[in-house]
Amino acid sequence: MDKARFQIVVVTFYDGGQFRNELENLAGIKILSLGKGGRWDLVGFVKRLINLVKMEKPDIVHGYLDVANLFSLLAGKLNGANVIWGMRASDMDFSRYDWTARFVYKMNVLFSPLPDGIICNSHAGKKFHLGQGFRPKRMEVVVNGINTQEFLPDGQNRAKMRHAWGVSEDTILVGQVGRLDPMKALESFIEAAAKISQKIPDVKFVHVGDGPVDYRNELLSLCQSYGLNDAFIWAGKLDNMPRVYNALDILSLSSAYGEGFPNVVGEAMACAIPCVVTDVGDAASVVGECGRVVPAGDAQALADSLVSLIMMPAGSRLELGRQSRQRVEDLFSVQTLVERSEHIFLEVAGL
């Protein structure tokens, strides 16, 4: 953002975090932590937040996700600041989560008329939240921006990651990236992988991401029941995502619900990797004509579309990847994200 017009303070609930060092290295950004002691450390945490906002005197307090939205509303309004909420998901199935997730979302619905603006990162998300009872003063869609200078085709990254995984250059590698969460429907991806392996035994599959141990063990057992142990790599959490995407030939997104703008799809496309996605959130509009879209929960359709790209001549698949990157550069640039966000912030602040 334009540092001549915006002074940015990032406030985190907890100390540390995987982005802390990266944020601290950005010029002109102040990073503060509220030192939250745990999930139920609320009274002291709220007092510290209110005092911090009072001290910083911001024109805008921008919450990010459901819990932060509620706290931003409280601290912002008590200190006379404008408040903007950030909503990132769509079509959530709250029955798959504990009561706190349902309660917090209901509170977001109840208090939705109070913030001065709400930013969704997908058109599907905006439609979903309005359908759930949100009544905002103003709700805008600002799609995510992909850093195409960080996420780009790189043969060396491809070779290094494939070597680490023991995957030869001539082996087709299909990957899925994301935390282990019911919304990602990894069961569907595993079932599709099993169907593909029956037709094309030499295809390899990889999942990158981590999550609850019990759920991970369930997925590992499912994978084993399909006889996929030799064909499936569970890579866990990795930090060098450009290297991960470049190692793939095809990215799969099997999510059943909850996606807004799926970053992993945009990042893979920026690395010139074609994608097969389920029709959740704005995934279909992200891939456009450069990928394949299948119904959520249909493992057979997912398998068929993946096979169509696997069997595609290598040159044609590379061209599809090139078109994918061009689409990201044209429609989902960081600059577009910044310009849209700045415009909304200035209007809300009356500047």
Image (cartoon, grey):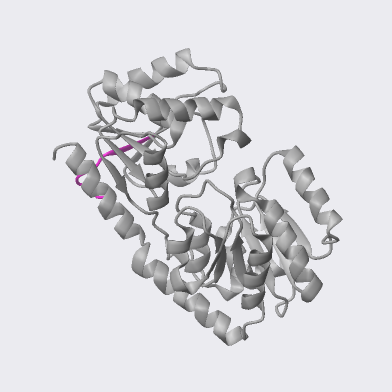
The image quadrant of residue 309 is bottom right
The correct choice, above or below, for 349 with respect to 280 in the image is above
Task: Tell me if 36 is positioned left or right of 87 in this view.
Answer: right
Residue 8 magenta: yes
| 95 lies above or below 209 | above
x, y (%) of residue 11?
Answer: 40, 32
- Which quadrant holds residue 233? bottom right
Give the percent coordinates (x, y) of residue 298.
64, 59
Residue 127 horizontal/vertical position (percent): 38, 46
Task: Report whether residue 17 is seen.
Answer: yes
**Furthest residue toward left:** 351
- How many marks on residues? 0
Residue 3: in sight, yes or no? no
Indicate whether residue 20 is drawn in magenta: no
Magenta part, dominant SS: loop
Residue found 62% across the figure and 82% down from its top = 312
The residue that appears at 44% across and 56% down in the rendered structure is 282
The magenta stretch is: 1-10
